[in-house]
Image (cartoon, coloured by chain):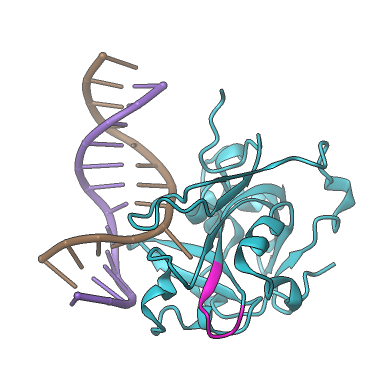
Chain colours: A cyan, B purple, C brown
Amino acid sequence: MILPKSFYSSPTIKVAKELLGTFLVHQTAAGTTIGRIVETEAYLFRNDPACHAHRGKTKRNEVMFGSAGRSYVYFIYGMYHCFNVVTGKVGEGEAVLIRALEPIEGIDLMSKRRKNHNHIQLCNGPGKLVIAMGISREQNGLSLCRSPLKLFSRDSFLKYRENNSRRSIIATSRVGISTGTELPLRFYIAGNIFVSTYRKH
DNA sequence: GGTGGGATTAGCT
DNA sequence: GCTAATCCCACCA
């Protein structure tokens, strides 16, 4: 089933954890791609200097201050985009950054969009998954309940259910930020090889 | 195996 | 002017 708007209105940290294992689906003219979310980061309104909303509402971050369940896409480093889900209460400016997906369907299309990249590296980073899924600033502000870009619950695609259905969640510090580095707001599925910083032990 | 730098631009100070 | 919720490749060991 499609995740309802109420799913996103919960406290942001809770949503960041509950998004793990859900399915991101994007239907485009070129075809449909699906990825399972395996890594997220929470960005909070209060006491979080790394959050875009920390210094108040601007043209760029205004959708973060809107209703939960919408897409927040922004441009970064002059060449990439990052995809977020708006969460929490209206007016508080919180969101969850989607950092990695396990490719599920439309692998050929993902590979074509990403150019010469192997299966493991298709969606194992926030900039990478945006390219693989065909997401751009055109999706900024859209409802994830009603647009061609949607999120489905964990049990929506039974044929892809995980072998170990009860994997644990690891919480660590977030990636690529210079402030708020001490906060344990990055979450990923333990042992999943599609996580952005996965290393063989 | 690991590290360092370049690409490229919107938004903020 | 400088930095940024990134990625990739060249180079060294």
In which quadrant will I find the N terminus of chain A?
Answer: bottom right
Q: Which residues are magenta?
A: A89-95
Name the residue nearer the viewer: A196 or A105: A196
- Give residue A91's position: percent from left, percent from top: 53, 85
C1 left or right, relative to A42 = left
Quarter of the figure with residue A117: top right
- Give residue A113's position: percent from left, percent from top: 55, 54
Quarter of the figure with residue A86: bottom right
- Give residue A44's position: percent from left, percent from top: 50, 68
- Give residue A94's position: percent from left, percent from top: 53, 72
Q: Residue at x 47, y 53 (%)?
A: A183
Q: Is residue C2 above or below residue A9?
A: above
A154 left or right, relative to A27 = right
Q: Is residue A186 above or below residue A97?
A: above
Quarter of the figure with residue A149: bottom right
In which quadrant will I find the C terminus of chain A?
Answer: top right
- Residue at the right extreme? A158
A6 left or right, relative to A14 = right
Check if residue A91 falls in the magenta segment: yes
Q: Residue at x 71, y 53 (%)?
A: A106
| Most common secondary structure along the magenta stretch | loop
Name the residue nearer the viewer: A18 or C6: A18
Q: Residue at x 83, y 46 (%)?
A: A160
Check if residue A48 falls in the magenta segment: no
